[in-house]
Image (tube, helix red, strand yellow):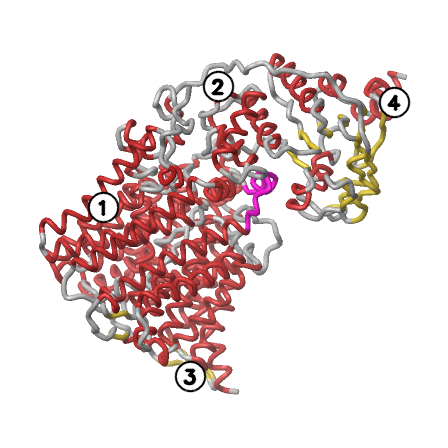
């Protein structure tokens, strides 16, 4: 049915790079032709200047592709990536002066850059958008000043020549060809790494974290760790290219090695090509580098400022008229081949172009219900205050295996706050949450990751889809928790989507789903993590009556597999039908508890919802 | 002791300058929700305007205000209308690139037109040293301090006491609700952006006689005003004033005792500490946390 299915004829090497099917293979062919042209053209033309242009293309394409791992996949707009370039350049230069070949210096620089990047990424992890950009600029400036000040190491503001020892060992050559080979090889290396990251679990994790941080955490993603990894990888790759470029230029100075404009150029190529796509930065560099290099070559010093002006104008034009980059202009077939994940399989159209009719979700199968088991969750005397506001007051909850516990209460009663404490998003002021682990022992988890590891899964009241991902990819993010391998995660995602009636939307982008579908997607994503305890936060709110019937059946089906469920719900029909027990919360305290029928007749409950007068009248 | 006092006074004067530049930046962020990376370039363009006006017409630099202010205001409105408004609802990164692109284009356009040379506006007596016992400063610096206080007070009065000011604040707090109240949001944004960059128009008139003009002059000031604006709490005008004074004093002392380069290290070090530990600014509560998740 779907060409996204892994075809058995694909060689393992290609599969490793995420090339699974015929469309991927076509994409790989385009890229191969493009890369071959990059290498062959200068060799055929044989002109020194053409060599120089193509070496520069390879360099910038590599830098930009490496930047894209942080700036695109992780969505952190670094404007300070020149600092890793500079670290690579300076490390290479310093080691060459100490008699060590740049082939080793390159890796030393990469290691230094990776450490620096990780040290920066950790505290900056929470900064978003412009704040991250500003921090990255500040770090760049710090390195710029350090390079000027540490004269004994760097040669100070005037810069330093690299000793002209010709030969492969020193990466300095009479001809241009060897430099081209090295630059080209490094570009291929960086592209390969970017492609592998994008199409394996790490890529999914980075994009999920970028799209919705809390949902990513709830899906068991170590959000801090993946961003540090991305930063370190990106920094190390940029650094290696920096070492090469220093040897190519044979001269470095702080002003050009730690240059803000250089950083912005790196970003520009990615933006023009298409941020977040694997090969966009390559396209951007191929399109733009020749313009500036040729204008510099032809006009020389009289063109001072010209290429900068052109870059600035292109930046503005691109963001206004083509914010998704050149990749978005390619014919659909080519685009599909380059990034098949973004396209609907049956039509080959980008999803955004197809109108979504009122969806008919597939019906859900139910099984026989097993008896209730032992206690799996125990909440003891939980208290939480926000300043003077008592949002949770001495709440006690007990949940047995396979049980469905309904939580109702007026708006602002503190239901979602309670969920946040039951899933590790908030820490209680006092009291305890004890979860029976799969090992049969009681645990007191702290933090989201702990709760996730004990099998507590949750949905969010306000749906949190990873909007730029397809339904399948959304569910895969959850499935990765138990299936680190892409193929099996994809298989599990497919199974769960079918089970939950999302099968036909598998390759639809999440942002195009109607609200009923999004609520189901929330459930599907958490189900892919195989939770033992499921916290459902208003999964029925706002869905139409026919979807409601389906949703109730769905939750029953989940319950019947032995999952314990706590559901916050306003839809009384669902609560009455689903719950074994109901807890009513008002002003942070449990005011009533029991089976659904007795709870709705409880005077205290009626009073809480309708006021004292109504309570009396009813009685 | 005298040295400390001199540095303190110098720091306050410097802080006043940073305040004038930063107030505009923070106003635009607070209302239009854009960090204008090209803010310094408006300063640079305005300084060139001052230079040419004084050079060709031989007038006192302060007189050029009548030309510079309307021109910069108009340029700001144009940029808001043509570049920022179409991107208003795009991703954050798009907005960053837009103003970064504008910044690069403006710097390099001026490089193409006027080269990397330094242009000195005549000092017109503004570099006269005022010797007040232990403290020594230039008359031009004193004027900057007075102007800074007047500007911050004026903007505060404008925002709180006038109809347009109230409309601007309302739009900043809730664009949709302001629109429903019949406020022409697009116009308010244009005016706000115009006012924001007019602040650097004023700054340009004040500093052109004291600092040399070059295409890259804006970059130095804008980096410092980012520091000030984040430290004061993005969008907070009084916070910016206070932070500008602190940074001015730090700048003066560090520059005197540690040298120009290490001074930058100190300032950016403070900036990073603030960004990481108090991204909402030093003075405000935790109210404006929309930028962290």
Q: Please state which of the two labelled residues, at mark 3 or mark 4, is closer to the viewer.
A: 4
Q: Earlier in the sequence, mark 2 or mark 4?
A: 2
Question: What is the CA distance from the residue labelled 2 to the residue labelled 4?
Answer: 46 Å
Question: What is the CA distance from the residue labelled 1 to the residue labelled 3?
Answer: 61 Å
* Whether residue A408 is visible: no
Q: Which residue is mark 4?
A: A603
Q: Are marks 1 and 4 on the same chain?
A: yes
Q: Which residue is mark 3?
A: B131
Disc 1 crowd, CA 10 A, few/some/many (<14, 14-19, 20+): many
The kind of secondary structure element at disc 2 is helix
- In the picture, residue A8 is in which quadrant? top left
Q: Which residue is more in the foreground, A299 or A208?
A: A208
Badge 3 sits on which subunit?
B
Residue at screen point 38% across, 32% down: A20
- In the picture, residue A299 is in which quadrant? bottom left
Q: Which residue is mark 2?
A: A504
Disc 3 crowd, CA 10 A, few/some/many (<14, 14-19, 20+): few
Question: What is the CA distance from the residue labelled 1 to the residue labelled 4?
Answer: 73 Å
The label shown at residue A286 is: 1
Find residue A242 and report its horizontal and vertical position in percent.
Answer: 31, 62
Disc 4 crowd, CA 10 A, few/some/many (<14, 14-19, 20+): some
Q: Which residues are magenta?
A: A213-224
Q: Is residue B17 above or below residue B104?
A: below
Q: Earlier in the sequence, mark 1 or mark 4?
A: 1
Badge 1 sits on which subunit?
A
The kind of secondary structure element at disc 4 is helix
Find residue B181 and report its horizontal and vertical position in percent.
Answer: 51, 32
Q: Is residue A581 magenta?
A: no
- In the picture, residue A570 is in which quadrant? top right
């Amino acid at each position: 049915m779907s060409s996204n299915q892994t075809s058995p004829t694909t060689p393992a090497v290609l599969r490793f790079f995420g090339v699974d099917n015929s469309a991927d293979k076509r994409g790989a062919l385009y890229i191969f032709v493009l890369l071959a042209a990059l290498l062959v053209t200068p060799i055929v033309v044989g002109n020194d200047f053409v060599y120089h242009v193509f070496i520069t293309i390879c360099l910038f394409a590599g830098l930009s592709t490496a930047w894209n791992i942080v700036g695109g996949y992780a969505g952190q707009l670094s404007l300070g990536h020149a600092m890793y370039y500079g670290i690579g350049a300076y490390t290479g230069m310093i080691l060459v002066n100490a008699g060590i070949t740049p082939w080793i210096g390159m890796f030393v620089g990469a290691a230094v850059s990776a450490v620096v990047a990780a040290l920066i990424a950790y505290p900056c992890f929470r900064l978003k958008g412009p704040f991250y950009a500003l921090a990255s600029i500040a770090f760049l400036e710090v390195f710029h000043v350090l390079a000027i000040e540490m004269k004994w190491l760097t040669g100070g503001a005037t810069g330093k020549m690299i000793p002209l020892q010709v030969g492969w060992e020193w990466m300095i050559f009479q001809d241009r060809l060897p430099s081209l080979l090295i630059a080209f090889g490094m570009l291929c290396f960086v592209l390969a790494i970017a492609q592998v990251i994008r199409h394996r679990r790490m890529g999914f994790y980075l994009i999920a974290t970028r799209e919705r941080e809390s949902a990513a955490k709830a899906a068991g993603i170590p959000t801090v760790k993946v961003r540090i990894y991305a930063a370190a990888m990106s920094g190390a790759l940029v650094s290696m290219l920096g070492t090469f470029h220093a040897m190519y230029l044979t001269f470095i100075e702080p002003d050009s090695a730690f240059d803000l404009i250089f950083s912005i150029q790196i970003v520009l190529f990615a933006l023009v090509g298409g941020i977040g796509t694997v090969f966009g930065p390559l396209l951007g560099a191929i399109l733009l580098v020749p313009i500036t290099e040729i204008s510099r070559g032809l006009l020389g010093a009289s063109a001072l400022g010209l290429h900068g002006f052109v870059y600035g104008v292109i930046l503005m034009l691109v963001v206004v008229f083509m914010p998704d980059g050149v990749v978005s202009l390619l014919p659909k077939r080519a685009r599909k081949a380059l990034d098949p994940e973004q396209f609907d399989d049956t039509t080959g159209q980008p999803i955004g172009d197809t109108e979504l009719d009122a969806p008919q979700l597939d019906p859900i199968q139910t099984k026989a219900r097993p008896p209730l088991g032992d206690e799996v969750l125990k909440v003891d005397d939980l208290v939480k205050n926000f300043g003077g506001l008592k949002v949770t007051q001495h709440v006690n909850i007990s949940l047995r295996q396979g049980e469905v516990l309904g939580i109702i209460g007026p708006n602002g009663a503190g239901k979602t706050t309670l969920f946040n404490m039951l899933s590790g998003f908030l820490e209680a002021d006092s009291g305890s949450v004890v979860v029976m682990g799969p090992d049969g022992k009681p645990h007191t988890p702290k933090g989201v990751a702990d709760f996730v590891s004990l099998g507590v899964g949750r949905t969010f009241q306000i749906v949190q889809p990873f909007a730029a991902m397809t339904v399948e990819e959304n569910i895969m993010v959850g499935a990765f928790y138990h299936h680190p391998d892409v193929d099996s995660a994809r298989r599990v995602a497919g199974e769960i989507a079918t089970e939950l009636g999302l099968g036909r939307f598998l390759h639809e982008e999440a942002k195009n789903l109607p609200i009923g579908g999004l609520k189901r997607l929330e459930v599907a994503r958490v189900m892919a993590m195989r939770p033992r305890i499921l916290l459902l936060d208003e999964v029925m709110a706002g869905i139409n009556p026919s979807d409601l019937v389906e949703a109730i059946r769905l939750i029953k089906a989940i319950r019947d597999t032995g999952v314990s469920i706590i559901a916050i719900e306003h839809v009384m029909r669902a609560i009455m039908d689903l719950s074994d027990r109901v807890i009513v919360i008002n002003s942070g305290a449990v005011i009533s508890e029991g089976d659904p029928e007795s709870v709705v007749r409880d005077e205290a409950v009626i009073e809480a919802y309708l006021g004292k007068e109504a309570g009396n009248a009813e009685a | 002791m005298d040295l400390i006092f001199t540095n303190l006074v110098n720091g306050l004067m410097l802080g006043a300058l940073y305040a004038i530049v930063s107030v505009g930046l923070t106003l635009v962020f607070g209302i239009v929700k854009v960090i204008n990376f090209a803010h310094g370039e408006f300063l640079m363009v305005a300084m060139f305007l001052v230079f040419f006006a004084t050079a060709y017409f031989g007038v006192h630099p302060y007189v050029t205000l009548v030309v510079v202010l309307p021109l910069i205001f108009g340029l700001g409105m144009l940029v808001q209308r043509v570049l920022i408004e179409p991107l208003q609802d795009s991703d954050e990164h798009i907005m960053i690139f837009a103003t970064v692109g504008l910044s690069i284009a403006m710097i390099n356009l001026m490089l193409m037109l006027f080269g990397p040379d330094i242009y000195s506006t005549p000092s017109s007596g503004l570099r006269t040293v005022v010797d007040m016992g232990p403290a020594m400063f230039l008359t031009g610096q004193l004027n900057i301090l007075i102007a800074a206080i007047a500007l911050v007070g004026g903007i505060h009065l404008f925002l709180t006491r006038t109809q347009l000011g109230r409309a601007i604040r309302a739009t900043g707090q809730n664009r949709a609700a302001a629109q429903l109240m019949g406020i022409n949001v697009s116009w308010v944004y244009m005016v706000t952006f115009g006012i924001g960059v007019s602040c650097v128009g004023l700054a340009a008139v004040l500093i052109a006689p004291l600092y040399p003009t070059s295409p890259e002059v804006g970059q130095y000031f804008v980096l410092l005003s980012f520091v000030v604006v984040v430290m004061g709490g993005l969008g907070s005008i009084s916070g910016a004033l206070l932070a500008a004074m602190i940074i001015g004093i730090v700048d003066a002392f560090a520059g005197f005792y540690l040298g120009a380069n290490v001074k930058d290290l100190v300032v950016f070090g403070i900036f990073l500490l603030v960004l990481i530990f108090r991204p909402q600014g030093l003075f405000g509560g935790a109210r404006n946390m929309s930028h962290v998740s």
